[in-house]
Each structure stands twice: as structure tokens, then as C-alpha cells.
Image (spheres, rainbow, N blue to C red):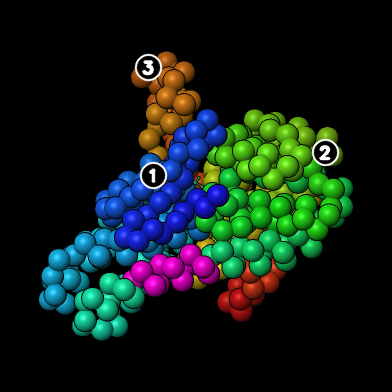
Amino acid sequence: MKPIEWLDNKLKIIDQTKLPQTTAFVELSDYHEVVAAIREMKVRGAPAIGVAAAYGIALGAQNIKTESKDRFISQFDQILQAFSVARPTAANLFRTIDRMKKIASTTDDTPIIKQALIDEAKRIHAEEEAATERLSQLGAELIKDGFTILTHCNTGSLATAGYGTALGIIKAAKKQGKKIDVIATETRPLLQGARLTAWELMQENIPATLVTDSMAGYFINQGKVDCVIVGADRIAANGDVANKIGTYTLAVLAAENGIPFYVAAPTSTIDLSLNSGAEIPIEERNPEEVTSIGGVILAPQGIKAANPAFDVTPHRYITAIITEKGIVKEPYGDRMKLI
Ligand code: MRU
């Protein structure tokens, strides 16, 4: 199953909003559709957003009908602008935009630029595949035989268009022959854990138990969890991590109960331009995602609801950050620059 696939001048993605009830693929032939798919979370997860945006930008460029470099660049900038506001937190999206912008500045020959943008998008995809595979192998070394791992949100192939980050490590540990068990949090409001992680774990035949987010502390405190592993949407230079809302709570719970708290991410998620997590933009989504579940309204009409999609975990709670270039520990400030 390929969650993201480039067909000649079309982008094919699995519609993650329909899973697990329906495995539906959609083909996108216009960049506006790719922007909408990212915003509506048909494609989601920081690395997968970066890959989808790369193909979407290349797709948009193919449809620019001018040979003038100036007019090409002015239309190309509009495409980049549309992607830049699709989802504000995922570092991978902005890394992709920077890379694609650089490619467009290499020559005045627009047909060459168009082809180079497709090639760059394929390169970004291949790099994420390789990085997530490698970090999963490295991270699996931290998992001991018999471990129960608690994970949050969804960080597998769907979220990365590759092997996975936190879930990649879990998959790799199982492949190494270790007996492992997983506790997956449902991840309100959009239930990426219940819908997507549970589905991916079952596909991989990995033993797992689904719990509501509020049950995590109970199981950790009962000694039922050996470590927590999560992914990341953006990592600041000091090691602070923005990830799915609820991650900070899990990190504090892990510290309080003396178990390791690991963050797994490709280096494309690290943003060294930000000194600390306080500078990471946090996406605010529609409050209706909180007042309803699966389109069914559950809260009384008129109630105020808040919906920050991510929170920031201070680096002091993070035992290690696992990347494809190595496993980083405190002091993050000095060591992040080396990877
Ligand atoms: O809002 P989402 O579903 O895009 O959020 C995804 C996460 O928070 C993941 O943990 C993160 O992107 C890492 S995925 C490899």
C-alpha cells in the first residue's frame, strides 16, 4: 500500500479521513486539490505533508502556461503561498517550500524548471523513505524484548509516506524478533490513534490495546508501560518538540513515573531557525472538531470550544530524540547542530 504515489502529472493519495472504514484513494490533478487535501487532513503527518506538498508544487508548476521566467515565477510564488498556509506547524512543509523555491531559481528555462521540480519532489519522497527506515532501525535498539510501548497520534506509513517514525521503531523492533506490546491512545479530537494507528498495527500483526487519552496516566502509573515513543511536527534548536496535542501530558507523566520518553523524527522535522518551542506556530483548528465526533454533534449548541492541534514538550522531559543521523540526548542545544 503506497499512501502517496506520483502518477504522471497526477498525485494519488489514500484518503486518511475515510480510514479505517474505507480504503479510498483519490487522484489530484490540480494543486488547489492538494492544498485542500492537506488542510482537510486527507493527507497528514509532518513528513507526509512535506512529500505531498512537494508533488503538489511540482503539479502546480506543470500547469503554468508561460515561457516568460518572470511570469512563471510570479505564478509559482502564488502556488508556494497557497501551500504555506495549509498547515502551519509541520516543519517538513516549509522545508519542502524552501527546496522547491531554490530549484525554480536555478535556470531561466521554464520547461527545465518544471522537470527539475518533479525530480526534486521524487527526491524529497525518497529521502523521507530512507530517513524513516534508518531512524526506525536505530530506535529499535532502544526497545528491549518484552517492552510495552505507549504511543500517541499516528506516526506510521500513512503519516510519513515512508516506514514511520514512532510506529516505524515499533515495526522494526517487532521485525528484530522482539516480543512487544503497544498501548495506542485514541488521540482526540480527530482520533488518529483509534482510526489510523490501530489500523496500521493490525495490518502489521502487532499486539496492541487502544485506550482513551485520559487512560494513559492510569496505565503508566500501574507500571504497565516501559517507554513512550511519539513523533514530532517541529523540533526547535534547543530540543523542544511540537507534536500532537496531548504529547506534553504524556511527557510529564513519563517523567513523574520514571520511564523514558522518546521522540522519533527525520532531521527534516528539525527547525534550527527557532531557538525554542515558544517560537513554534501552533495550528488552531475548527472548534467543531471538539464538539463533534465523526460528524455527530455531541456538545450543547453554543458551547465555546478550543482546538489547538499541537502542544510543545520542553526538552527537559525528552530522554532522547531519534533521527536517521543518530540518537540525540541532552544537552540538545549543542548536539542538535551536529546532526
Ligand atoms: O494533525 P496531524 O495528524 O497531522 O498530526 C500528526 C502528528 O502530530 C504526528 O505525531 C507527527 O506529524 C509525526 S508523524 C511521523
Type of the residue with mark 3: Gln
Q: Residue at position x 66%, y 51% from top? A: 167
Q: Which residue is mark 2?
A: 224
Numbered mark located on residue 26 in the image: 1
**Sequence order check, earlier mark of 3 and 2:** 2
- Under tag 1, what secondary structure? strand
Q: Residue furthest right?
A: 145
**10 Å neighbourhood of mark 1: few (<14), some, or many (≥20)?**
some
Q: Residue at position x 72%, y 66% from top? A: 138
Instruction: Find out if the beta carbon at label 2 lies less than 8 Å from the nearest ligand 1 atom.
Output: no
Q: Which residue is mark 3?
A: 301
Type of the residue with mark 1: Val
Instruction: Single out the mark in the foreground, 1 or 3.
Output: 1
**Sequence order check, earlier mark of 1 and 3:** 1
**Whole-percent x and y of residue 85?**
32, 53
**10 Å neighbourhood of mark 3: few (<14), some, or many (≥20)?**
few
Q: How many marks?
A: 3
Numbered mark located on residue 314 in the image: none
**Sequence order check, earlier mark of 1 and 2:** 1
Query: In this picture, is 73 found above or below 302?
Result: below
Say if the magenta span includes residue 109: no
The magenta segment: 117-127
**10 Å neighbourhood of mark 2: few (<14), some, or many (≥20)?**
some
- Under tag 3, what secondary structure? loop
C-alpha separation, residue under disc 3 versus residue under disc 2: 39 Å
**Whole-percent x and y of residue 251?**
67, 48
**Whole-percent x and y of residue 164?**
61, 55
